[in-house]
């Protein structure tokens, strides 16, 4: 039987036999591993219905033993590798992060057998391929509360994703409290796309998200989308906004979907893009951006600050480039690594800026040149091709949530791509990793999130974590088939496409 592991570990050696879980099994961990011990106890309780006792001291046959490896636990440079040994007992070894990932692996290996549970005898040695393995949630088009964001963190971290990109601002709403600019949330957060309820995170809410993400070994990447996608700023600071610019695509789309057009100073409830821009050359804009971005930087322990740069269709190219140059320099000056969508590669981005590529897996020459620019400036690329990695695209034409402008993305399409094979003439280390964005124009609930997330996020997780030479659709198909049991036990919803013979162990 193929072991039901996604993402596939770098080395899996199966041994004959299995460990039958005894009711007396305990978790043995010293106090350096107590966080991991309670995660493991929760996971076992969730799968089997009984929670093992956590003890210190020596192990007995049948116990789970957690061994925290000495070494760095600085999140940004943490060693994510781990080992799992299952024989007479279960031994997991790693840094705090490695232990967390080893536990996620054991979670997938637990198999019900009759009335009991068993674990196969196996030796696993595992480490990730890429350092950046992200998921994104758009909380601007539709606002999701802290509990929903935590639920998203639980799902993503179980697949060994380690970055949570939050798209905090867009035309439809401003979702983060900024003390120096209180009008942003007072006036700019009350609504969402299609008239859905708005909302925003207080600074304490945001700190709680950061804390919860960190406990799940994920770094929060906040995004303030600039200079376009900024209509909501105009509800608070009209003095720094240009008048809306209507492009043909926007007009046609609004007519087709029966959506409103943007009106300066009024909440925007449609989902057209490319109509808004802050004033690029106005000193008040830069005062505003210094205030806002320094507060976001102060609030964020992680190294990244994403400043958007996508779809600035209403901004003249020279103005756009001047803006990007200045805003990425501003972020770098705040001690953060700037991150932008790849269009910003038209400009002289600050040294070390990370580009997030969202073009096709078959890029246009212009997109490829923009992407390459980041590497010329000493930065790297995070790959989010919209026709394979976009979680907001429908699986098939009949799917009830999602968009379809980039592609229909079934599970195989989400699986079948190679991040280093998209942009030519790059060294492999230019690719920092992958990210799966979930835009929220068409989703309103956690159940909707799950529909788009499971199972495709598992395909993208494997692309980010597992060795390139193990990437194999047939193998993935058989390994993922049992994970519905893990997801069901956690009461996570999701789609069950017929591409997979779901087993429900
Ligand atoms: C494009 S991709 C966008 C978003 C939309 C998304 C919908 C990118 C950087 N911008 O504004 O939400 O398409 O799929």
Image (cartoon, helix red, strand yellow):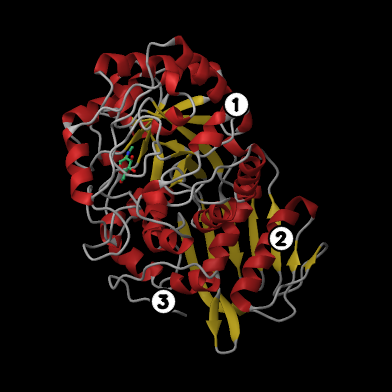
146 lies left or right of 230:
right
According to the image, label 3 marks what residue?
1
The residue lying toward the viewer, choosing from 300 and 161, is: 300
The percent coordinates of residue 457 (x first, y second) are: 40, 56
Q: Are marks 3 and 2 in contact (CB under 8 Å)?
A: no
Determine which residue is flagged by label 2: 37
Determine crowd level at label 2: few under 14, some 14-19, many 20+ residues with C-alpha closer than 10 A.
many
Q: CA distance from mark 1 to mark 3?
A: 52 Å
Q: Is residue 245 visible?
A: yes
Q: CA distance from mark 1 to mark 2?
A: 35 Å
**Ligand 1: does it lie within 8 Å of the C-beta at label 2?**
no
Q: Quadrant of residue 409?
A: bottom left
* Above or below for 143 versus 379: below
Q: Which residue is mark 1?
A: 295
Looking at the rendering, the quadrant in which ligand 1 lies is top left
Q: Residue at x 16, y 34 (%)?
A: 248
Is residue 191 rendered to the left or right of residue 104?
Answer: left
> Number of numbered discs present?
3
Nearest the camera: 91 or 371? 371
Q: Residue at x 65, y 40 (%)?
A: 207
243 or 208, nearer to the observer? 243
As drawn, 393 above or below 43: above
The kind of secondary structure element at disc 1 is helix
Residue 373: x, y in percent? 31, 22
């Amino acid at each position: 039987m193929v072991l039901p592991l996604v993402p596939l570990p770098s080395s899996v050696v199966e041994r004959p036999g299995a460990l039958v879980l005894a009711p007396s099994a305990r978790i043995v961990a010293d106090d350096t591993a107590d966080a991991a011990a309670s995660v493991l106890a929760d996971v076992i309780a969730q799968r089997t219905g009984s929670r093992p006792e956590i003890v210190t001291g020596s192990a007995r046959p049948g116990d789970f033993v957690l061994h925290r490896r000495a070494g760095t636990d600085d999140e940004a440079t943490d060693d994510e590798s781990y080992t799992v040994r299952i024989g007479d007992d279960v031994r997991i070894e790693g840094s705090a992060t490695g232990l967390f990932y080893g536990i996620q692996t054991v979670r997938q290996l637990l198999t019900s057998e009759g009335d009991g549970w068993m674990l196969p005898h196996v030796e696993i040695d595992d480490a990730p391929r890429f350092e950046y393995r992200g998921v994104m949630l758009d909380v601007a088009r539709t606002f999701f509360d802290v509990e929903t964001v935590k639920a998203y963190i639980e799902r993503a971290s179980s697949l060994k994703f380690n970055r949570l990109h939050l798209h905090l601002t867009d035309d439809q709403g401003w979702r983060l409290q900024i003390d120096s600019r209180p009008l942003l949330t007072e006036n700019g957060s009350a609504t969402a796309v299609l008239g859905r309820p708005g909302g925003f995170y207080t600074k304490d809410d945001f700190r709680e998200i950061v804390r919860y993400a960190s406990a799940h070994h994920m770094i929060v990447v906040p995004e303030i989308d600039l200079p376009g996608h900024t209509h909501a700023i105009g509800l608070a600071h009209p003095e720094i906004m240009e008048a809306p610019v209507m492009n043909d695509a926007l007009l046609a789309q609004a007519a087709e979907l029966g959506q409103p057009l943007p009106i300066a100073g009024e909440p925007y409830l449609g989902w057209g893009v490319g109509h808004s821009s802050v004033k690029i050359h106005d000193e008040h804009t830069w005062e505003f951006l210094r205030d806002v971005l320094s507060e976001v930087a102060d609030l964020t322990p992680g190294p990244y600050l994403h400043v958007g740069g996508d779809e600035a269709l209403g901004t003249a190219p020279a103005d756009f480039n001047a803006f990007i140059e200045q805003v990425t320099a501003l972020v770098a000056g705040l001690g953060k690594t700037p991150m932008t969508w790849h269009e910003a590669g038209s400009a002289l981005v600050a040294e070390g800026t990370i580009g997030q590529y969202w073009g096709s897996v078959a890029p246009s020459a212009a997109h490829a040149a923009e992407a390459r620019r980041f590497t010329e400036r000493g930065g790297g690329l995070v790959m989010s091709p919209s026709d394979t990695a976009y979680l907001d695209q429908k699986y098939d034409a009949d799917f009830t949530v999602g968009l379809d402008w980039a592609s229909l993305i079934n599970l195989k399409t989400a699986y079948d791509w190679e991040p280093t094979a998209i942009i030519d003439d790059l060294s492999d280390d230019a690719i920092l990793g992958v990210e799966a964005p979930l835009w929220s124009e068409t989703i309103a609930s956690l159940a909707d999130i799950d529909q788009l997330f499971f199972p495709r996020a598992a395909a993208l997780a494997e692309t980010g974590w597992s060795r390139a030479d193990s990437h194999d659709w047939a193998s993935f198909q058989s390994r993922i088939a049992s994970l519905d049991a893990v997801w069901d036990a956690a009461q996570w919803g999701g789609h069950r496409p017929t591409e997979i013979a779901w087993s429900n162990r």
